[in-house]
Amino acid sequence: MKRVFIVHGWDDSPEGAWMPWLRRELEARKFLVIVPAMPNPEEPEIGAWVAHLAKTVGEPEENDIFVGHSVGCQTILRYLESLPAGTRVRGAVLVAPWFHLPHIAEEGEEAAAIARPWLETPIGLERVRSHAGKFVAVLSDDDPQGPIEDKPLFEKYLGAETIVEHAKGHLGADAHLRELPVALNAVLKISG
């Protein structure tokens, strides 16, 4: 059975936005779907989140697919980077991913301090790419947090297929998204 791990974002939960819908849709198609509650979601920390995902996954399997939202995407990339050489999974769907947060200062000093390690700790993208078969990045053209300017970076460094949604904000609760068919279709495409 193919496993799908859905990693929610900052200040979110497994019940946020479109995640319950995606879980139901995938389970109806016979996927085993795991949506862990990430630790201390109000103040996500790299080490704690990557360790929690690694514990949740256990032994990675070649048919595993990961779906992340926002900082959940960062968590997935950093988890993939940590895998031993030769370990490969099927792929990842990155919803509202980012490498830069140009407007984080507007969120206040506390938010900027939480984001700083995520922004300043490099990710070995070549290593990440070696551990997954396919990447799909889903962005919105008006996302205030996940800048559309990062689109070419996902294409260049991860070989990601990029999909740009129109006027869907940060592709989550901010845009009142209870369903996200583009994410479902991306998982189904990656699953082969």
Image: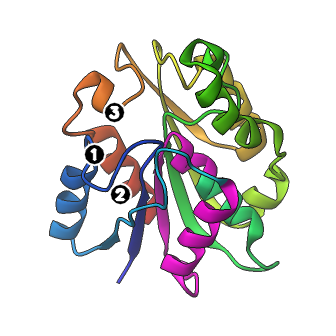
Would residue 31 appear left or right of 92 to someone viewing this image?
Answer: left
> Which numbered mark, 1 or 2, is in the foreground of this view?
1
Look at 27% across and 39% down and name the residue there: 180
Q: Would residue 192 be seen by someone viewing this image from the given angle?
A: no
Q: Which residue is disc 3 drawn over?
A: 172
The Cα–Cα distance between marks 3 and 1, rounded to whole angstroms, is: 8 Å
Q: Nearer the viewer, residue 96 or 104?
A: 104
Q: Which residue is disc 2 drawn over?
A: 188
Secondary structure under badge 1?
A: loop
- The amino acid beneath tag 1 is Gly
Secondary structure under badge 3?
A: loop
Circles 3 and 1: CB atoms closer than 8 Å: yes
Would residue 158 appear left or right of 185 to someone viewing this image?
Answer: right
The earlier-in-sequence mark between 2 and 3 is: 3
The stretch in magenta equals 46-74
Look at 58% across and 12% down and name the residue there: 106
Q: Which residue is disc 1 drawn over?
A: 16
